[in-house]
Amino acid sequence: MNFSTLRIDRPRQHVMLVTLNRPDVANAMNSQCGTDIMTLFEGLNLDGGDTRCVILTGSGERAFCAGADLKERNGMTDEAWTHQHLIYERMVRAMLGCPVPIIAAVNGAAYAGGLELALACDFIYAADHARFALTEVTLGIMPGAGGTQTLARAVGERRAKEIILTGKPFTVAEAHGWGMVSKVVPAGQLMTEALATAETIARNAPISVRQAKLAISRGANMSLWDGLIVETEAYYRMVPTEDRREGILAFNEKRAANFKGK
């Protein structure tokens, strides 16, 4: 996996570390960056291989992602703008649909599209100096990479309206208090914490993890009774697997399970 705007590492078994790698522009997304992210996650949708957890972070300590690269957008025609936005639409859908769990490790500012990237992940860990905003309405546009939907689901409709309609930044403490950020840690410990959680997820049965993620994600947008049907269908996917038999056997033999994703 070679991408001009992303760095891909394998810091632990079954864990993929994806780093937005445009530090000279606060990791702002240009068209190529959006295309790279889209291609990466569409690939994971088709075949996750041995990847059981992904961590998404930004290069440097200044920013996770400052949003879309507005210098690239300066003077864009309507047609070019629409074409670029289609890339971002496909990018966020690929992330939201990815069966492999994604942890956002927000190492600095996550503004506009950068916050939308973090919100497209399954949960967020953040450095204690991180800041957030959806500033689009101050620029004559609006969130268009899922932000109006993912933020409302993370913090509630009324809070999301306040954040989006004012465009005002908010602190990591506020984000944590509202439930948008799962954990706040000193900057030097961010990757350690994210890797520890990724390793924990990667040790679990991968089919179980993916099916549980699917049930949570789909069920969140359904009635309780419809969600229970989705959960049951997801559950029965596990019954005939080798991992289910291995998990129960390992428990009874008092040893660590060796899950193979089969």
Image (cartoon, helix red, strand yellow):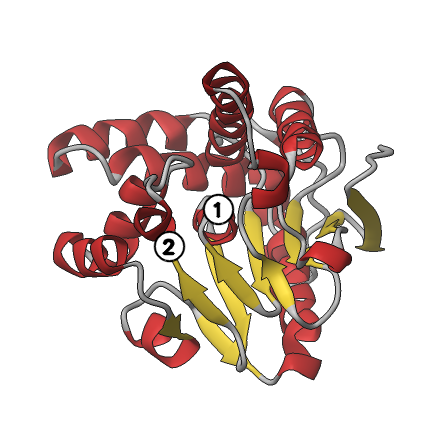
x then y, percent, for residue 28:
63, 49
Q: Nearer the viewer, residue 103 or 229?
A: 103
Q: Secondary structure at mark 2?
A: loop
Q: Residue at x 49, y 31 (%)?
A: 238
Quarter of the image for the N terminus: give it.
top right
Helix, strand or loop at label 1? It is helix
Question: Tag 2: Cα neighbours inside 10 Å, few (<14), some, or many (≥20)?
Answer: many
Considering every residue shown, the one lying at the far front of the view is 75
Q: Is residue 63 visible?
A: yes
Q: Is residue 155 above or below residue 42?
A: below
Q: Which mark is residue 135?
A: 2
Is residue 32 found left or right of 205 in the rendered image? right
Q: In the image, is residue 104 above or below residue 91?
A: below
Per the rendering, the mark at residue 13 is none
Label 1 CA crowd tier, 10 Å (few <14, some 14–19, many 20+): many
Residue situated in front as seen by the camera: 38 or 111: 111
| Residue at the top extreme of this rendering | 79
Which mark sits nearer the N-terminus, 1 or 2?
1
Tell me residue 135's x, y (percent).
37, 55
Quick check: can you spot residue 248? no
The quarter of the rendered structure image containing the C terminus is: top right
Residue at image point 34% right, 25% down: 233
Q: Which residue is mark 1?
A: 113
**Is the C-beta separation of discs 1 and 2 under 8 Å?**
no
